[in-house]
Amino acid sequence: MDDYKFGITTTDSDVASEYGVSSDTVVLFKKFDEGRADMTESLDNAEEVTKFVSANSLPLLVDFNHETAQKIFSGEIKNHLLLFLSPKSDEYASQKETATTIAKDYKGKVRLQPVLSLVKMLLTFSDLGSFREH
């Protein structure tokens, strides 16, 4: 949770009014998917708030690579389904759309993880990555 910026306001403030918040709510603003996620229940439960932030802090589908691996696998979601997809495939758009639908249905329970390059994945999880510099 240390990686997230946050603010606190009251429901009678201009900020709450501007964003349509009329009762106690945790609002997570994001630059992907639906743009924001609201939590209105169990706000006094730190574990539930942590799960909510974790489940909503990454896009439904984020390309697996060296930079994203740590965030993906260190989160609260421990079940992952790796999808080996090729953006060059004629079926890529429909596969991505299907994966997004499934990811929405299982949000917070299973993370669907597209792997657009098998080479990237192998380099990330093996000692082979050290050979890149030689």
Image: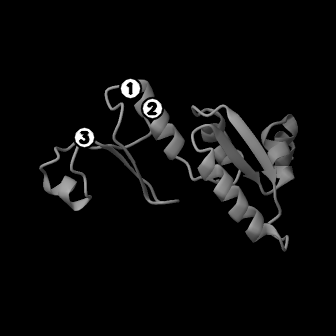
Neighbourhood count class around disc 3 (C-alpha, 10 Å): few under 14, some 14–19, many 20 upward = some
Q: Quadrant location of the N terminus?
A: top left
Note whether residue 1 is visible: no
Q: Is 4 situated left or right of 68 in this image?
A: left
Across and down, in percent, residue 19 comes to 26, 58
From the image, state whether disc 3 or disc 1 is nearer to you.
3
Is residue 59 shown above or below 26? below
**Residue bearing the label numbered 3:** 24
Residue 52, position in %: x, y?
46, 38
Q: Is residue 87 left or right of residue 63?
A: right
Q: Which mark is residue 46?
A: 1
Which of the marked residues, 3 or 1, is nearer the chain's N terminus? 3
The CA distance from mark 2 to mark 3 is 16 Å
Task: Identify whether 86 is placed above or below 131.
Answer: below
Image position, residue 89 (x, y; %): 85, 70
Q: Residue at x 51, y 38 (%)?
A: 54
82 up-or-down from 126: above or below: below
Question: Which residue does the numbered mark 2 point to in the structure image?
Answer: 50
The answer to whether the residue labelled 2 contacts the one labelled 3, judged by CB atoms less than 8 Å apart, is no
The answer to which of 94 and 1 lies nearer the viewer is 94
| Displayed quadrant of residue 87 | bottom right
Evaluate if marks 1 and 2 touch, with contact meaning CB atoms under 8 Å apart. Answer: yes
In the image, what residue type sits under mark 2? Thr
Mark before the other along the chain sequence, 2 or 3: 3
The residue drawn where x is 27% and y is 44% is: 7
Q: CA distance from mark 3 to mark 1?
A: 15 Å
Q: CA distance from mark 1 to mark 2?
A: 6 Å
Disc 3 residue type (three-letter): Asp
